[in-house]
Structures are given as C-alpha cells and as structure tokens.
Image: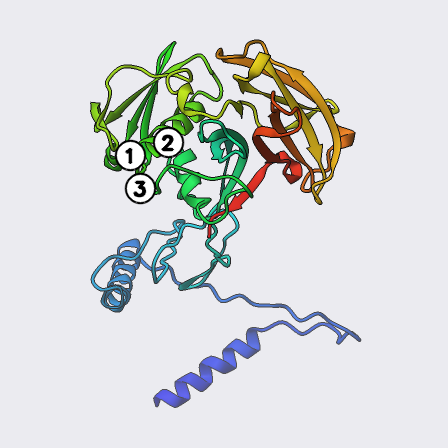
C-alpha cells in the first residue's frame, strides 16, 4: 500500500472515532488553544546571551574610544568649553554640550578720596611794623578722584593741589617738591620725615622760617603743645635753608614767633552754635586789638575792641565771638588790627580773613 493511501486511512479512522458534534448554538465562544513551547536548556540560553552581548559590545567600545561605557544608574555630563565660575550678579546657563555665561556690564570706577583738615597759610599784613607774615589757618577739603593724595601726611600734597587755587588774599611758602613723606608720634613729639627738597628751604631766610611755621602749626593743629622733630631720610637736619639752620632739636609753636606778624590766627573761622569764634595770638600795645566784620563791598558792619592776655612786648592769646547773623559765608570777611597809638585811627598789622561757604575751602584735583 502506498504512503498516501496509508495517510488517508489514518485520517478516516480519526474522523470515525470523533463523537457527534453538539447542536449548533446561536452563539458559541471560540476556544483558544495554546500551543506548548519547548524550553531550551539553561546552558544554551547562557551561551546565546553571551554571544549576543559580545557582538553588541564591539561597536560600543569602538564608539567610546576603547573605554567601557558608564554603568547604569550613573549620569555623566560632559561640558565642552571652559569652566566659568559665576560671580554675584552673573548668570550661567548650561545646555547640553555647551556653557553660556553672561557677564554683567563692567564699568571701572575708582572711589574718590576726600581729605579734610586744617592747613596754615599766610598773609602779608597791611601797615606791619616788622613786615612779617601772619599765619592764617584754613579748613580745607580736597577731593581727589584718582586717590593719589599722599598717605603719610596729605596736607603737603593738598597744598600742591591748591597751588593755582589758593583762597583769596592768602599765600603758601612751601614749595611743591617739599613733602612730608612720613610721620611718627609720641606723647609729646611729632617726627616729620621730609623729602630731600626740604633742605633747600623756600628761598630766603624769612621764607624759610615761614615754611617752618606753616608746617609746625599744621602738624600740631590737633595738639598745639606738641613739639616737632624734622628729619630727612630718617636723619637729623643739620643744615636747613639759606642760612644752613640747625634743626636737630625739637621745635614748637613758640620757636619762630619773632618772624610772625604781631597779630595772627590759630583757629580757622568756623560757625558753631550760632557764633564764629575768632581766636589767635598777638603782641600789641597794651594787649589791645580790634575785630571788625566787613561785607563783600568792604563796608564795616560790626566792630569791637578785644583784650588779649598779654601785650607790649609779650605774646598773649585772644578770643572773641562774632554772632553768626553778622556773617554771610562767601561774602563776609573778618579783619583784625590794632589802632595806631599815635593818631588812634590808622589800622596797623591789619589782616583780612575771608569766611568761606560751608566754612571750608574746597579743592578738586584735576
């Protein structure tokens, strides 16, 4: 019997052995028949997985330059470009492969230095018996946009700045190249180390002494009783000025009184508590002098006598209060003088001191 016939017979038997089908219902669910799967041996599974991993690993290693990929669960971000640390006010945004940093606009500014202090200048008085200068203290405010004022003691730098802008009627005997380059202070002494130019003086004996008086009175403005020791390069001064003056010993406010006008001020004109205090030193006949207030046109609006503590050959001190209502800063001036003992009308040793706006002479370095 052929193979085909045997298969037909077998199929026929199977059909014959099948039971009669049930009556056909209106709806009958279709039964799902699951074909069982053959399970592979674990060894075969492992071998296949290993082969697959090996096959995939080759291109990954090639793409990453030979380094193994980062293990799962770790995220690595690589930023291409320089790393920038943001300062306050700087925004930094990182996106993908690049870092964009926005810097704030930077405008370079230097804080201005403002120095304020008392500087002693001088005035050539009218009708002076001796022809000596009168010291005049001025409250000075120097604004320095570039912060170049000398740190040691800026008043000599301030004087240099004021060279072309001195208060009206006042003068300065200290040359521009004479500077205080360093100071030291003890309980009773101020040491002023000066620039080399100090040794040359100011051009004549009277000018040399006037410069000394200006420096001494300015350095002792806060403590009038202190002495001053001058040095140059840290060494005592053995030859100063035109006459080769020896300055190895301390000097003070009394050292060169003989070279000053018989009336001068020791305090700047500053309004306080409704008055202007006018104070200074004098050596006038019978210790008498006069204070007068004049307006911008030179008219006298107030005058009164003043009695000093000493006179007639002995230096004394004086002080008088002027009502602020009599003073218009920027326009008013204070005059000090003594009336002639001969005629009672001539004003001798006369000095005229302006009252500044805000009581301060303001200078700005260029």
Residue where numbered disc 2 is placed? 211
Q: Position of residue 112 (x, y in %)?
A: 49, 44
Which residue sits at x=35%, y=40%?
A: 175
Upstream in sequence: badge 2 or badge 3: 3
Q: Nearer the viewer, residue 139 or 323?
A: 323
Label 2 residue SS: helix
Would you say residue 1 is visible in this rendering? no
Measure how far apart labels 2 and 3 are at the Cα level. Answer: 13 Å
Q: Nearer the viewer, residue 39 or 208?
A: 208
Mark 3, residues whose alpha carbon is within 10 Å: few (<14), some, or many (≥20)?
Answer: few
User: Is there a contact, CB below 8 Å, between mark 2 and mark 1?
Assistant: yes
Q: Determine the image quadrant of residue 245.
A: top left
Residue where numbered disc 1 is placed? 201
User: Is there a contact, CB below 8 Å, between mark 2 and mark 3?
Assistant: no
Measure how far apart labels 2 and 1 are at the Cα level. Answer: 8 Å
Assign the N terminus to one quadrant of the image: bottom left
Mark 1, residues whose alpha carbon is within 10 Å: few (<14), some, or many (≥20)?
Answer: many
Q: Position of residue 210 (x, y in %)?
A: 39, 30
């Amino acid at each position: 019997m052929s193979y085909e016939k045997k298969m037909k017979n077998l199929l026929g038997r199977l059909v014959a052995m099948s039971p009669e089908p049930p009556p056909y219902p209106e709806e009958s669910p279709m039964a799902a028949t699951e074909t069982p799967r053959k399970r592979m041996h674990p060894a075969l599974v492992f071998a296949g997985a290993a082969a697959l991993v090996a096959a995939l690993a080759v291109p990954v290693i090639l793409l990453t330059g030979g380094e193994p990929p980062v293990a799962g669960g770790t995220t690595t971000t690589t930023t291409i470009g320089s790393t920038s640390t943001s300062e306050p006010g700087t925004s930094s945004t990182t996106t993908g492969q690049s870092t964009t940093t926005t810097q704030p606009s930077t405008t370079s500014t230097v804080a201005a230095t403002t120095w304020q202090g008392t500087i002693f200048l001088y005035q050539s008085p009218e009708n002076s018996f001796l022809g000596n200068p009168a010291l005049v203290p001025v409250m000075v405010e120097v604004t320095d946009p570039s912060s170049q004022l000398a740190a040691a003691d800026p008043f000599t730098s301030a004087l240099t700045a004021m060279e072309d802008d001195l208060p009206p009627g006042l003068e300065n005997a200290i040359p521009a190249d004479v500077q205080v380059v360093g100071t030291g202070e003890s309980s009773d002494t101020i040491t002023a180390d000066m620039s080399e130019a100090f040794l040359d003086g100011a051009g004549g004996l009277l000018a040399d002494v006037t410069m000394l008086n200006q420096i001494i009175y300015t350095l002792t403005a806060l403590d009038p009783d202190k002495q001053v020791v001058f040095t140059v390069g840290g060494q005592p001064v053995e030859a100063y000025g035109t006459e080769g003056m020896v300055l190895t010993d301390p000097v003070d406010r009394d050292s060169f009184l003989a070279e000053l006008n018989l009336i001068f001020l020791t305090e700047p004109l500053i309004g306080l508590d409704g008055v202007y205090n006018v104070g200074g030193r004098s050596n006038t006949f019978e210790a008498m002098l006069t204070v007068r207030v004049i307006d911008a046109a030179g008219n006298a609006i107030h005058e009164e006598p003043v009695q000093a503590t000493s006179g007639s050959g002995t230096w004394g001190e004086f002080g008088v209060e002027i009502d602020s209502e009599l003073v218009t800063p920027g326009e008013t001036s204070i005059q000090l003088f003594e009336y002639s003992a001969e005629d009672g009308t001539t004003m001798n040793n006369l000095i005229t001191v302006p009252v500044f706006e805000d009581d301060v002479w303001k200078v700005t370095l260029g």
